[in-house]
């Protein structure tokens, strides 16, 4: 799916195919976009996130079964992040679930909407309605230490100080929108779910107060605070525990798809674990990790961090080696494991005023 905002992006915007979506990877040099996101406010084209509505009398029962976190009491004023798993405990997607009066609205991760909706329909034993709303609605994001100021200038200053994961149905320029306090990067973050026909004007007005940041800058900032990035971290055969995303699963729920596999992984304690590292050049995923000359794991994902001015990445290693301060050899270079967050967001020291 292509972004509805493509004709408003700069001519030299670099696009890339992420799953089922063509998304802007960068509008300008990544260092510039990163600086905007970490020091000021960035507007994000999140049209690669599909919006899937689940409605019907049994919508909540269905959502309880297919989402790994407890959404039984998710009201229309709240949203939460959750994993969606298959029967073997493998990650299908990581979603943002919005409570709605007549069910839920699920926002997929970037490029994963087709896989998510197929999974939901495959498991629809409750005869609920599953509707792809992405032809009607799209998502714009605002992130950064001063993103709250942009919210005030665009919509309403009172919305800037909403509690985290709060949702408000409001209007912008007379148009109904869903506004949420969210965030992927550790900075102040907000999302605006708007009709597709209204998105271009909202983008134009947002750009007057914030710089644009593409998928590469967003994912770098996410990595720096260890926010999961499913498309980079989920590999065949890895459990939720190995990925390090067990905080997105509620094993106290009575039942959900994949629960037995998750419990087995937790009880066995087997498998590898994921930990951050820095050092060396940027290795490709799958590059072997050595400790004392022995193969102990592999690189999951790595990039050049603008904030650290060094390589930053994730390795999946033997469980007893998943700790900060250890030295490994990756692609012939010495690297050091880290504790997260790897960058302290500026928003942590800036109050909303």
Image (cartoon, rainbow, N blue to C red):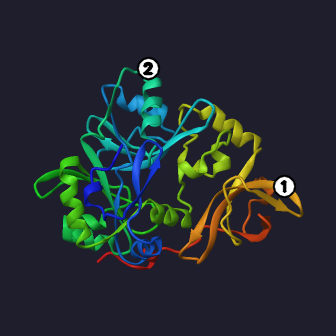
Work out which residue is located at the far right of the displayed protein and give it. 293
Q: Is residue 273 left or right of residue 108?
A: right
Question: Residue 16 appears at what percent x and percent y?
Answer: 45, 53
Q: Which quadrant of the rendered structure holds the N terminus? A: top left
| Mark 2: secondary structure | loop
Query: Residue at the left extreme?
Result: 174
Query: Residue visible at 76% across and 64% down?
Result: 330
Q: CA distance from mark 2 to mark 1?
A: 45 Å
Secondary structure at badge 1 equals strand
- In the image shown, does 32 or 131 lie closer to the viewer? 32
Residue 300 in the image: above or below residue 279: above
- Residue 322 lies, with reference to residue 207, above or below; the image says above
Q: Which of marks 1 and 2 precedes in the sequence?
A: 2
Q: Is residue 171 left or right of residue 329?
A: left
Asked whether residue 278 is in view, the answer is: yes
Q: Which residue is mark 1?
A: 295
Residue 172 percent across, percent down from the top left: 16, 58
Q: Residue at x 54, y 43 (%)?
A: 250
Residue visible at 37% across and 55% down in the picture: 165
Mark nearer the viewer, 2 or 1: 1
Task: Give yes or no for contact between labels 2 and 1 (Cβ–Cβ under 8 Å).
Answer: no
Near mark 1 (Cα within 10 A), the count class, few <14, some 14-19 or many ≥20, is some
The residue carrying mark 2 is: 125
Q: Is residue 334 above or below residue 190?
A: below
Question: Crowding near pointer 2: few (<14 within 10 Å), some, many (20+)?
Answer: few
Q: Tell me the quarter of the image containing the C terminus.
A: bottom left
């Amino acid at each position: 799916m292509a972004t509805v905002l493509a004709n408003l992006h700069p001519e030299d915007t670099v696009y890339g195919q992420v799953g089922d979506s063509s998304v802007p990877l960068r509008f300008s040099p990544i260092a510039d976009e990163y600086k905007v996101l970490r020091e000021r406010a960035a507007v994000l084209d999140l049209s690669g996130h599909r919006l899937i509505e689940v409605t019907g009398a049994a919508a909540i029962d269905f959502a309880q079964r297919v989402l790994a976190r407890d959404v039984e009491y998710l009201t229309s004023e709240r949203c939460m992040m959750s994993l969606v798993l298959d029967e073997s405990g493998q990650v299908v997607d990581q979603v943002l679930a919005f409570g709605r009066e007549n069910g839920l609205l699920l926002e997929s991760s970037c490029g994963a909407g087709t896989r998510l909706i197929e999974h939901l329909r495959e498991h629809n034993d409750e005869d609920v309605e599953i509707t792809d709303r992405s032809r009607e609605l799209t998502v714009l994001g605002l992130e950064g230490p001063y993103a709250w100021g942009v919210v005030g200038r665009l919509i309403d200053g009172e919305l800037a100080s909403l509690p985290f994961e709060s949702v408000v149905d409001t209007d912008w320029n007379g148009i109904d929108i869903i506004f949420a306090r969210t965030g992927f990067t550790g900075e102040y973050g907000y999302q605006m779910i708007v009709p597709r026909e209204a998105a271009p004007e909202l983008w134009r007005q947002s750009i007057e107060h914030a710089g644009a940041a593409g998928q590469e800058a967003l994912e770098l900032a996410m990595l720096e605070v260890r926010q999961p990035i499913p498309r980079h971290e989920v590999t065949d055969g890895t459990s939720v525990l190995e990925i390090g995303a067990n905080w997105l699963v509620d094993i106290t729920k009575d039942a959900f798809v994949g629960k037995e596999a998750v419990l087995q992984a937790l009880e066995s304690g087997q498998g590898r674990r994921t930990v951050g590292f820095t050092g060396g050049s940027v290795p490709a995923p799958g590059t072997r990790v050595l400790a004392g000359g022995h193969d102990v794991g592999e690189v999951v994902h790595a990039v050049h961090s603008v904030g650290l001015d060094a390589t930053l990445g994730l390795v999946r290693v033997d469980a007893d080696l998943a700790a900060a301060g250890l030295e490994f050899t990756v692609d012939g270079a010495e690297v050091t494991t880290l504790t997260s967050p790897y960058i302290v967001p500026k928003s942590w020291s800036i109050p909303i005023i």
